[in-house]
């Protein structure tokens, strides 16, 4: 199964390490440093057209990729739990 993150981007369920609320997650200095490193190393993919609401950490062939999505973490988690593609 796959999870649609927005903007025609989908990732396999099996590659998802975690789905995080961006408002809550970015309150931590460590998370902000992680996002800065991911962006610097080309591992950050922004698939949001608006202000991103969630951060999705995924395995990739080269290590990890971090996606920023305009969809809320609750919406994405609900899709994973229900097994729906949309």
Image (cartoon, rainbow, N blue to C red):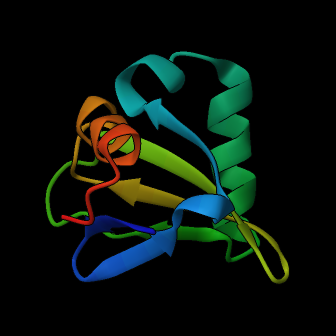
- In the rendered structure, the answer to whether residue 68 lies left or right of residue 5 reads right
Q: How many marks?
A: 0
Residue 5 image position (x, y, % from top left): 32, 63
x 20%, y 48%: residue: 51
Q: Is residue 25 above or below residue 7?
A: above
x 18%, y 64%: residue: 86
- In the rendered structure, the answer to whether residue 7 lies left or right of residue 15 reads left
In-front residue for pair 57/29: 57
Q: Quadrant of the N terminus?
A: bottom left
Q: Is residue 19 above or below residue 1?
A: above
- In the rendered structure, the answer to whether residue 34 lies left or right of residue 79 reads right
In-front residue for pair 77/21: 77
Using the rendered view, name the quadrant where residue 39 is placed.
bottom right
x 25%, y 37%: residue: 72
Using the rendered view, name the quadrant where residue 40 is placed.
bottom right
Residue 59 image position (x, y, % from top left): 74, 65
Residue 84 image position (x, y, % from top left): 26, 57
x 51%, y 26%: residue: 26
Residue 41 image position (x, y, % from top left): 76, 72
- In the rendered structure, the answer to whether residue 6 lies left or right of residue 73 reads left
Q: Is residue 64 above or below residue 10?
A: above
């Amino acid at each position: 199964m796959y999870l649609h993150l927005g903007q025609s981007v989908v990732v396999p369920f099996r590659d998802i390490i975690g789905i995080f609320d961006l408002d809550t997650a970015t309150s931590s200095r460590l998370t902000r440093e992680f996002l800065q490193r991911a962006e610097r190393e080309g591992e950050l993919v922004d698939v949001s057209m608006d202000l991103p609401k969630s951060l999705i950490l995924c395995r990739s062939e080269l290590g990890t990729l971090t996606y920023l999505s305009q969809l809320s973490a609750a919406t994405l988690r609900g899709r994973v739990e229900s097994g729906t593609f949309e």
